[in-house]
């Protein structure tokens, strides 16, 4: 009788442990999803600011407007289940568009001195800062998730719960060499 009680107690403890691990993994996974969603929100805001700049460029250079419009149309939504590679692709689109806008601004000094242009560039810098912060939060969340699912015995439970390691967002060394957007 005592042996049956001990076996039942051990099974109950294992079930409770499994439930608590599953809840912890869900929480960590949702933190990563939330961080990715925040990146998506900030990227969308940056694209909106780029669209405003695009309207300003239209008045100065119709050909460049068409090129930039085509680049900006390549954007896609970044959601909670997006991958790090999706974010990096969007970053590349923004970098390409910004390079073209900067070239137009250099060619048309009155555009560069336009108050709306300066305000939109300041907005873009703000959004860039927010995206950078969101990327840090995302990578921190991924570190916590990946570290947890690699540790024994959780490493045995994570696959059963459908939780797997996530990719980090890479830093772009070329961005540190980018000219100021001011």
Image (cartoon, grey):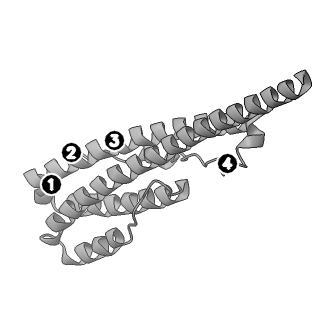
Q: Which is closer to the viewer, label 4 or label 1?
A: 4
Q: Is residue 136 above or below residue 168?
A: above
Residue at the image position 27 percent from the left and 61 percent from the top: 101
Q: Position of residue 20 (x, y in %)?
A: 63, 33
The crowd level at tag 1 (other Cα within 10 Å; few <14, some 14-19, many 20+) is many
Q: Which is closer to the viewer, label 3 or label 4?
A: 4
Residue 145 in sight here: yes
On residue 122, the disc is: 2
Q: Quadrant of residue 133?
A: top left
Q: Position of residue 161 (x, y in %)?
A: 67, 48
Q: Which is closer to the viewer, label 2 or label 3?
A: 3
Q: Which is closer to the viewer, label 3 or label 1?
A: 3
Q: CA distance from mark 4 to mark 1?
A: 50 Å
SS at mark 4?
Answer: loop
Q: Position of residue 100 (x, y in %)?
A: 31, 64
Question: Residue beneath label 3, please?
Answer: 130
On residue 161, the disc is: 4
Question: Residue beneath label 1, please?
Answer: 117
Q: CA distance from mark 2 to mark 4?
A: 44 Å
Q: Tell which of 109 and 101 is nearer to you.
A: 101
Q: CA distance from mark 2 to mark 3?
A: 13 Å
The crowd level at tag 3 (other Cα within 10 Å; few <14, some 14-19, many 20+) is some
**Residue at the far front in the pictured view:** 1
Q: Earlier in the sequence, mark 4 or mark 1?
A: 1
């Amino acid at each position: 009788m005592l042996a049956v009680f001990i076996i039942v107690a051990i099974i109950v403890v294992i079930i409770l442990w499994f439930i608590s691990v599953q809840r912890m993994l869900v929480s960590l996974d949702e933190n990563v999803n939330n961080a990715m969603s925040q990146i998506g929100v900030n990227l969308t805001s940056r694209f909106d600011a780029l669209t405003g700049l695009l309207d300003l460029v239209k008045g100065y250079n119709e050909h460049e407007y068409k090129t930039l419009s085509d680049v900006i149309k390549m954007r896609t939504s970044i959601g909670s289940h997006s991958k790090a590679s999706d974010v990096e692709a969007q970053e590349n689109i923004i970098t390409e568009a910004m390079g073209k806008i900067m070239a137009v601004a250099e060619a048309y000094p009155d555009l560069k001195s336009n108050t709306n242009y300066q305000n939109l560039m300041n907005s873009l810098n703000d959004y860039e800062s927010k995206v950078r912060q969101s990327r840090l939060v995302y990578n921190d969340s991924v570190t916590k998730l990946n570290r947890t699912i690699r540790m024994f015995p959780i490493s045995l439970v994570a696959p059963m719960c459908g939780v797997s390691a996530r990719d980090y967002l890479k830093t772009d060394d070329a961005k540190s060499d980018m000219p100021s957007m001011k």
